[in-house]
Amino acid sequence: MTDCLFCKIVAGDIPADKLYEDDEIIAFWDISPQAPKHFLVIPKKHIDGPSAITAEDDALMGRIMRVGSDLAEANEIGDNFRVVFNNGAVAGQTVFHIHMHILGGRPMNWPPG
Ligand code: AMP
Ligand code: ZN
């Protein structure tokens, strides 16, 4: 999608501090971290957000979860981390290309804000 920030990161048109890449997925450190360790895992395929996932994305979304957990482990937050998907502007989504936040390295509160 031409006007999508994360599609531009996928295409290499905007730089990102990547920690993982394969043919379907990339992960990069969040530019405005909300915890000592905060990275995003995204599909290279453009999907607007969780509401736009279809059955054909089931395996891809499962891989995103598994790769995110492996990256949490590799980055020493594997025992305690928060996974967040924001869906919709009111819920805090600002980039409309689906992304899984993984945050760790500090205690987390519940309920979230
Ligand atoms: P959300 O509010 O759930 O849509 O999350 C979007 C996230 O993308 C925010 O945590 C931003 O800090 C992050 N972000 C925005 N632009 C960039 C960028 N160029 N590189 C890395 N992270 C970014
Ligand atoms: Zn996109």
Image (cartoon, rainbow, N blue to C red):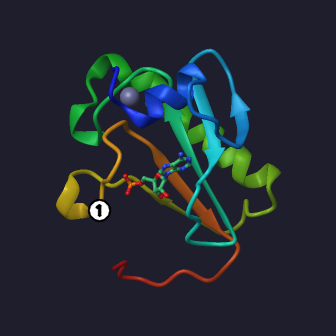
Ligand 2's image quarter is: top left
Please report the residue visible at 21 percent of the width from the left and 56 percent of the height from the top: 89
Position in image of residue 112 (x %, y %): 37, 78
Q: Which residue is mark 1?
A: 92
Could you tell whether 73 is left or right of 16 in the image?
right
Q: Is residue 103 above or below residue 68?
A: below
Quadrant hosting residue 67: top right
Quadrant hosting residue 28: top right
Residue labelled 1 has its Cβ within 8 Å of some atom of ligand 1: yes
In the picture, the quarter occupied by the C terminus is: bottom left
Please report the residue visible at 59 percent of the width from the left and 64 percent of the height from the top: 103
Q: How many marks?
A: 1
Residue density around tag 1, few if under 14, some if 14–19, many if 20 or more, within 10 Å: few
Please report the residue visible at 33 percent of the width from the left and 55 percent of the height from the top: 86
Position in image of residue 96 (x %, y %): 31, 40
In front here: 85 or 30?
A: 30
Residue type, mark 1 in image: Gly
Position in image of residue 5 (x %, y %): 42, 36
In front here: 102 or 3?
A: 3
Position in image of residue 107 (x %, y %): 61, 83
Q: Is residue 3 above or below residue 102?
A: above
Q: Is residue 108 above or below residue 62?
A: below
In the picture, the quarter occupied by the N terminus is: top left
Name of the residue lying farthest toward the front: 13
Please report the residue visible at 21 percent of the width from the left and 39 percent of the height from the top: 51
Could you tell whether 2 is left or right of 9 in the image?
left
Q: Is residue 32 above or below residue 27?
A: below
Could you tell whether 1 is left or right of 108 in the image?
left
